[in-house]
Amino acid sequence: MIFKKKIITPDKIDWYQEPQQLVLQDARQLPLDNNYQPRHTLVVFIGGAMDDVYGPVLQGVFIPYRLRNAQQQDIAYATHGSVRAIVELVGRWHKAGKKIVLVGHSWGANSAMRVARNLETTCQIELLVTLDAVSRRLPGKQIHKPGTVKQWLNIYIDYRKASMEYSNTVARLGGYWGYCRHADENIRLSRDGAEEVTHAQAARMFREVADRVQVV
């Protein structure tokens, strides 16, 4: 899969301008509207490295999901370096008695796990979804499910069979988790018909669990 570099900034994307939009971006974090009141289950999509440039989660998952489900869920997007801001956001929805769903891809999946661990003594995460998670700290089989997480779904690429396609190589170098023994469910992907499923295809991975996110 070949990416065309496209810088995504608030002035170039009109949905960033919506007063009730929830978007968190690393040090360039956009201010949240404190008047925005939690109404529904909060679903936070967390992109991996360079996701705000290439958009596997931002454009491929978050935008289409939000267009379909904004009336029944509160839906946010964050880049993987926004852990502290996500923790604060989740805390607001928890205090309002709303359920929480975290969906992370690549490094963003590791960030989702970090958020869950930060909240381990304060609130419950109804659903944690990791899409081909990457980090350098521990292999997937050693990663424990945080006590605050009610259900953890792990979708992963089988890199024993995957090609040396560019994004797959990035995942290999980054430290892919693969199968996670402590997840409630592991879903292994390798092909979609005749087409190989690669690390960059966050939207294809999310299709495996989208219906379960929608019903929380």
Image (cartoon, helix red, strand yellow):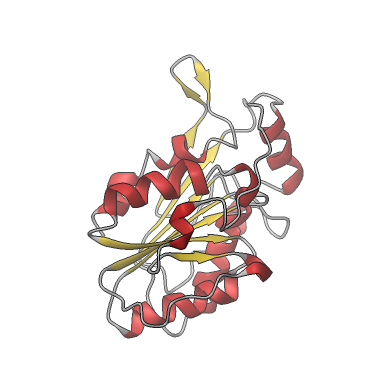
- How many discs mark residues in the rendered view? 0
Q: Is residue 26 left or right of residue 109?
A: right
Quadrant of the snapshot with the C terminus: bottom left
Q: Residue at x 51, y 40 (%)?
A: 202
Quadrant of the snapshot with the N terminus: top right
Residue 80 rendering spot, x and y as whole percentages = 61, 60
Rendered position, 65 above or below 115 = above
- Asked if residue 41 shows in the view, the reply is yes
- Asked if residue 129 shows in the view, the reply is no
Q: Residue at x 49, y 23 (%)?
A: 191
Q: Quadrant of residue 215?
A: bottom left
Q: Is residue 137 left or right of residue 91?
A: right
Rendered position, 38 above or below 161 = below
Along the line of sight, the residue nearer the viewer: 11 or 196: 11
Along the line of sight, the residue nearer the viewer: 182 or 99: 99
Residue 125 rendering spot, x and y as whole percentages = 39, 69
Residue 186 rendering spot, x and y as whole percentages = 44, 45
Residue 49 rendering spot, x and y as whole percentages = 67, 52
Q: Residue at x 42, y 42 (%)?
A: 206
Q: Residue furthest top?
A: 194
